[in-house]
Image (cartoon, rainbow, N blue to C red):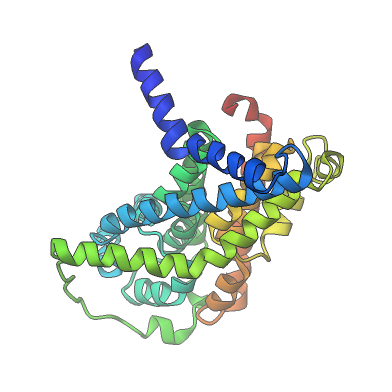
Amino acid sequence: MNIFVSVFSWLNDQLLKMEWLYRLIQLLVEKVFRLDISSRIGGSLHFFIYDTIKIFILLSILIFGISIVQSFFPPERSRKILGRFKGIGANTIAALLGTVTPFCSCSSIPLFIGFVGAGLPIGVTFSFLISSPLVDLASVLLLASIFNWKIAIAYVIVGVVLAVVGGSIMSKLKLERYVEPFVLENRLAQADTPEFSRKDRLLFAKSQVTSIIKRVWLYILIGVGIGALIHNWIPENIIAAVLGKENMFSVIIATVIGVPMYADIFGTLPVAEALAGKGVGIGTVLAFMMAVTALSLPSMIMLKKVVKLKLLVIFAVIVIIGIVLIGYLFNAIGFLFL
């Protein structure tokens, strides 16, 4: 058993946390740039180069593997799977399906039109739309690489629970009347899902890596830059005063800050890493990440094109309340994840 734990720990440190890369960048900063990584400039440069390279390496590998999985669940097949279930079971399947079909917020309109137009309940559709950008397999491994496996798994669990509960509440409220009429009138034909060959899946995975990297690279660089700034330049007492464990409003503040931002989860991870390094509670960190990814401003603007304002507000309020409650819960039990 000890041998298994040791092997797993070594693989985790070298493959996910990339300690070899950390030491390599340390040598680069100290020998080439002649900077001490314990200094502000040296530490910022090390943080930026190390996190950027690590995230891009992991992201490319993970997107390729996840895209192979996703090729088995195109939107039409996802719709057919969801159509077989009713009630909270449908919400649960929708949330779980969202974790293996990581559609971004830019896909919200066609997915919403497709799912609702195919007759799926509003609540089930929203369970999928909450889960899909919020939780995916890549986020699990990236969170584990930055924090630990307990936090990574906990993030996935609370993300799925939020999607299930949020979608279930929306189902109970019977909000179909707040969907724009053209969406309900857009009933889709029962199209067959095309089968991918092995070559098709590999080409699809390759194209997804290229497409997603092109879409998120700037946000990753911005996120890493902000993380380096927080980690090395903003005094810990300032962070503690605003988002520290002693501030009872820290979770609410983090959520409010995160909602209007637009970034993929991969861009928020370096910021989350830096905040955690400054002593910010894990619940506050998770609340920030969830607010950015689940309620990004562009996503809300696009959804407004297919739903009426009242439905959009109800959706946002339900998700925000869920995020805040999750944040406070994890701040209270954060010691379990250290």
Image quarter of the N terminus: top left
Q: Nearer the viewer, residue 233 or 293?
A: 233
- Residue 255 visible? The answer is yes
Left or right relative to 302: residue 188:
left
Image quarter of the C terminus: top right
Residue 106 vertical position relative to residue 73 in the rendered view, above or below: below
Residue drawn at x 30%, y 60% as measured from the top left? 82
Residue drawn at x 61%, y 66% as measured from the top left? 262
Left or right relative to 135: residue 317:
right
What is the x, y in percent for residue 112? Answer: 42, 73
- Residue 122 visible? The answer is no
Q: How many marks?
A: 0
Residue sitting farthest toward the top: 2
What is the x, y in percent for residue 118? Answer: 31, 74
Which image quadrant for residue 81?
Answer: bottom left
Q: Nearer the viewer, residue 48 or 265?
A: 48
What is the x, y in percent for residue 145? Answer: 50, 39
Q: Nearer the viewer, residue 200 or 287?
A: 200
What is the x, y in percent for residue 250? Answer: 77, 45
Which image quadrant for residue 5?
Answer: top left
Q: Nearer the viewer, residue 88 or 44?
A: 44
Left or right relative to 214: residue 44:
right
Residue drawn at x 45%, y 44% as measured from the top left? 140
